[in-house]
Amino acid sequence: MTRAIRWSVPLALLLAAPALAAPPLSGATPAPANPAPAPAAAPTPPAELVAPPVTVVPFIQPFDLDATRRMAVQVMVGGEGPFSFLVDTGAERTVIARELAARLKLVEGAKLKLATIGGSAVVPSFRVAALRMSDLHLAPVDAPAFFGRHIGAAGLIGVDMLEERRVLIDFRKETMEILETRKRARPIIRDDDAIVVTARNSAGRLILSDARLDGKRIDVIVDTGAQTSVGNLALQKLVAAKRANRLPFLPTTLGAVTGEAVPAVRTAIRRIVINGMDVNDLPVSFADSQAFRALGLVERPALLLGMDSLSLFDRVEIDFPNKRVVFDLPEGASHDMGRRFAANGIRIGG
């Protein structure tokens, strides 16, 4: 069981660039200005200082948790469909399955160099004239292509479709809401026991800025495309040095989007603290991943926080422009020690 406590195997991560260019693309399967202030000479009552709410028409999309507990939504591609795409906040680019590209007779574009979880590869891209989820549209794009059997869906919705918006995921209702936002907009989730975590941006991904293991800072990427959480070798070394693993390190494999099997080891980390919130007994696989190198996350311990952890919460709000993630503890949780358990395939005693 994994526990989220306050106060106390496919994955996906994608970076893209044309072949032979410097920045790689990586993939893995098992991470409006404020109103002007009032003049000093004429103080404004406090109630009038509050910025007005953002007026938007929200896009609300039901989603299904697939067999790997990743979020699948229905997407129209060039007016055809709908097709099942996975929502992946760890992917810089929206991706299409090769089989779907062939079925729709899409025009092939430039080759893209890939840095996968296991190595590098070159894959084709295809010109997608339009992608649509209800009223949400993405402009024409050259989408890198992988085989659908390795993606586990007809495609991936990456942060290029989400980066100017905020995403509210409600695991209780199984809905995903995509909203326009603005700089310094207030969070949607404002419960007393909500955990607000600021982040920095790296190639469109949000890296949480206040996460620690035994006092040592670690980088954490919220990755809705990952079934489970994956750490780099620096994090594995830290876990071993601090004896922070609850279970022995056991061999396992991760499946890359190219279809290759990547050797890894797996354990459960006793405790990671994210802005005062404890995440206990977290199952993590560790691999020498090219995906971490592509993001410049090699020397510092780093973790792709997958759906096995995110689904512990009632709601998760990801605000890309404001570089902020808000975690909503379950309604029935104690304000002092909110607990949520999720089945994740590992039995932990004690």
Image (spheres, rainbow, N blue to C red):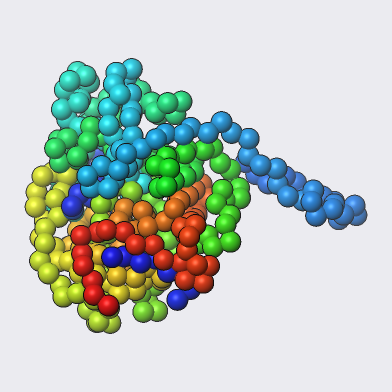
Q: Nearer the viewer, residue 317 or 203?
A: 317
Place of residue 271 in the rendered image (x, y in percent of width and height, measured from the top left) = 34, 73
Judge by depth and name the residue closer to the eye, 100 or 73: 73
Q: Residue at x 49, y 57 (%)?
A: 331
Q: Residue 181: where, in percent of width, then height? A: 56, 41
* Relative side of 97 to 142, left or right: left
Residue drawn at (31%, 59%) of the image: 342
Q: Is residue 346 visible?
A: yes
120 on left or right of 348: left
The one nearer the camera, 196 or 4, is: 4
Observer able to see residue 238: no
Outermost right residue: 41
Tell me if residue 55 comes above or below residue 5 in the rendering: above
Query: Looking at the image, which residue sits at the far bottom?
Result: 242
Looking at the picture, does residue 19 appear above or below residue 203?
Answer: above
Quadrant in which the C terminus appears:
bottom left
**Residue 31 x %, y %:** 30, 54
The answer to whether 180 is drawn above or below residue 246 in the figure is above
Q: Residue at x 36, y 46 (%)?
A: 89
- In this figure, what is the number of numbered marks? 0
Q: Is residue 111 left or right of residue 191?
A: left
Tell me which residue sits at (17%, 44%) in the image.
257
Q: Quadrant of residue 160?
A: top left
Question: Residue 36 location in percent, x, y?
Answer: 75, 46
Q: Quadrant of the N terminus?
A: bottom left
126 over 347 or under it: above or below: above
